Image (cartoon, rainbow, N blue to C red):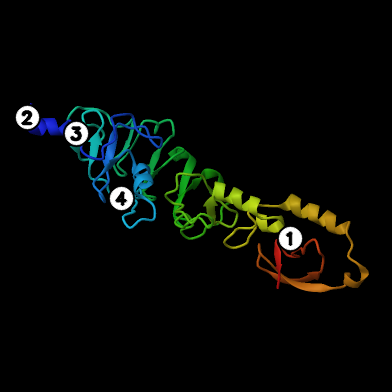
Amino acid sequence: MSTKTTTSRVPFPGVPPAGQGCRHYRRRCCIVAPCCGEAFWCRHCHNEAKGGSGCSAHEIDRMTQIREVVCQKCFKRQPPGRECVDCGQVFGNYYCKECNFWDDDGIQKQVFHCDKCGICRVGGRENYFHCDACGSCYPNEIRNSHTCVENAMHQNCPVCLQDLFQSTTQVTILQCGHTIHQDCLRELQMAFAGLQSLRCPICSSSLYVYEELWMEMDRQIAETPMPAEYQHVQIGIICNDCQQASSVPFHVLGHKCPFCRSYNTRRA
């Protein structure tokens, strides 16, 4: 056996032991990170190992062009492809040549590539539409009801400050059109009390439609009359939902917008 052939069968430094992938993806090849030349199962494995706060810390994102992979059957280093050029091992049941992405579970996950997003997404192409204004694929259920915010998905989460577009965790699209990690929204709602927990952390609009809550506040205010000296006091408010300014009766429980009937208001 020649030296060249022997070398191609032996893992070079940084190649993980042969296997079927990592906790992120099941596959049979490793990517070679163009930044450091080391091999990892996926970009997440690379970022977990190389990220941090040190002077040599660095990360790669899903837009990074992968030029080499390593077969985990014969350890042949080669350009990206569906299968190994040497031993014929298929690297993954799902393969996207645009993203250089492999995943044995891709079919079950209904992974599809969106040309406008430039990345692969999960959930089935027939279940999503691409909103050009928001710059991302959204579920069909909100095609005619969501509020467009320019490049809404190309922002950082307002809570954890991590990129939303490349996130692998669930992202929630709020009524106002802004976006946030679902887990971060849950933490935010637990951290605040009262109306503050119902507001978008970016624009203060109501997170969702709260008609039943506003009706309950109507009932509570009707059952809680103010002392005589406050019954004719008027204050100026601005509605966080419709942005209208108005003058309304003062009440300790809340101030209702006369235009959209929301209690998500602030003192003017």
Front: mark 1 or 4: 4
Q: Quadrant of the C terminus?
A: bottom right
Residue at 24 percent across and 28 percent down: it is 73
Q: Quadrant of residue 231?
A: bottom right
Q: Position of residue 184 (x, y in %)?
A: 56, 50
| Residue behind mark 4 | 64
Front: mark 1 or 3: 3
Q: Quadrant of the N terminus?
A: top left
Q: Nearer the viewer, residue 56 or 87?
A: 56
Is 36 drawn above or below residue 112 in the view shown?
below
Residue at 74 percent across and 64 percent down: it is 257
CB-based contact (under 8 Å), mark 4 and mark 3: no
| Residue behind mark 2 | 2
Q: Quadrant of residue 87?
A: top left
Q: What residue type is disc 4 on? A: Thr
Ranked by sequence position, the earlier of labels 2 and 3 is: 2
Q: What residue type is disc 2 on? A: Ser
Q: CA distance from mark 2 to mark 1?
A: 78 Å
Q: Position of residue 189 (x, y in %)?
A: 64, 51
| Residue behind mark 3 | 76
Q: In this view, which residue lies farthest toward the front?
A: 54
Q: CA distance from mark 2 to mark 3?
A: 15 Å
Q: Position of residue 39 (x, y in %)?
A: 27, 41
Ranked by sequence position, the earlier of labels 1 and 4 is: 4
Q: CA distance from mark 1 to mark 4?
A: 46 Å
CB-based contact (under 8 Å), mark 2 and mark 1: no
Q: Position of residue 244 (x, y in %)?
A: 68, 69
Q: Secondary structure at mark 3?
A: loop
Front: mark 4 or 3: 3
Is 117 drawn above or below residue 103 in the view shown?
below
Q: Secondary structure at mark 1?
A: loop
